[in-house]
Image (spheres, rainbow, N blue to C red):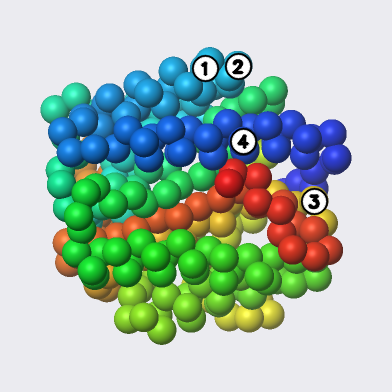
Amino acid sequence: MITVKSNEELSIMRKAGKITGDVLKLLEENIKPGISTKDLDRIAEKYIRSHNAFPSFKGYRGYPATLCVSIDDEVVHGIPNDKRYIEEGSIVSIDVGAFFNGFHGDAARTFAVGKISAEKAKLIEVTKQSFFEGIKYAKTGNRIGDIASAIQQYCESFGFSVVRALTGHGIGKAMHEDPEVPNFGKPGHGIRLSANMTLAVEPMINMGKFDVEFLSDGWTVRTKDRLPSAHYENTIVITDGEAEILTL
């Protein structure tokens, strides 16, 4: 069931979204060669709890951490580890959520670690911009497929591919609500958008083919061809005009 939020609920979601977005800004300052992915996780959890919120991902379906930290060819859901260190030249996708007063915020960014290749830099840039291309269509009366199609067409115009096996989602009292928000599709298809719907729109874009595999840890998703992947996500509110972004 798709839930439309009240103005009071949206005011809480704005606070959850701000905490989520601010965590990512803090992590950007701390991502340097030599830091462990678990250290990043500790920084994030401390920040979220200090703002009277709870890490959305921790304990979700048994997930053990505050962050998903995915490096290079990992698409999403990489589990932080004390023995895994961030290396110069890699790209690191961080996904995080904050649960505040009964509502979730959810956002992701892909960060460059030191000097990266031009190809990786382009992948990050295109993935981020594809989100903004998609949400041009995130307004009352349009359809989910309008967002999805815009993301797909933009990324594929640069020779990149859109992950099919994972999608964005509705968000609110639950971390994942209806509807699914794919990053590929046809204009004019899918559910019709209405004001005060809240969505997590999250392009996951691969440098190579869109095929992925799920690893034996039950969480980590990697590209099958082992080429890099990037991720960019924000929680948004549908309005009659331009979508409101809660996690920037």
> What residue type is disc 1 on?
Arg
Q: How much space separates mark 4 and mark 1, taking CA atoms?
A: 14 Å
Residue 95 is situated, as x and y percent measured from the top left of the image, at: 42, 42
Whether the residues at callouts 3 and 1 have beta carbons within 8 Å, the answer is: no
Cα distance in 3D space between marks 3 and 1: 27 Å
Depicted 17 relative to depicted 90: above or below = above
Nearer the camera: disc 2 or disc 4: 4
In the foreground, 14 or 59: 14
Quadrant of residue 75 in the image?
bottom left
Can the viewer see residue 74 in this picture? no
Disc on res. 18: 4
> What is the secondary structure assignment of the residue under circle 4?
helix
Q: Alpha carbon of mark 1 to alpha carbon of mark 2: how far?
A: 5 Å
Q: Residues within 10 Å of mark 2 (few under 14, many from 20)?
A: few
Residue 184: % across, % down = 50, 72
Amino acid type of disc 3?
Answer: Asn
Q: Earlier in the sequence, mark 3 or mark 4?
A: 4
| Residue, disc 1 | 49
Residue at left offset 84%, top offset 34% = 8
Residue that badge 3 annotates? 196
Residue at mark 2 to residue at mark 4: CA–CA distance = 13 Å
Residue 52 image label: 2
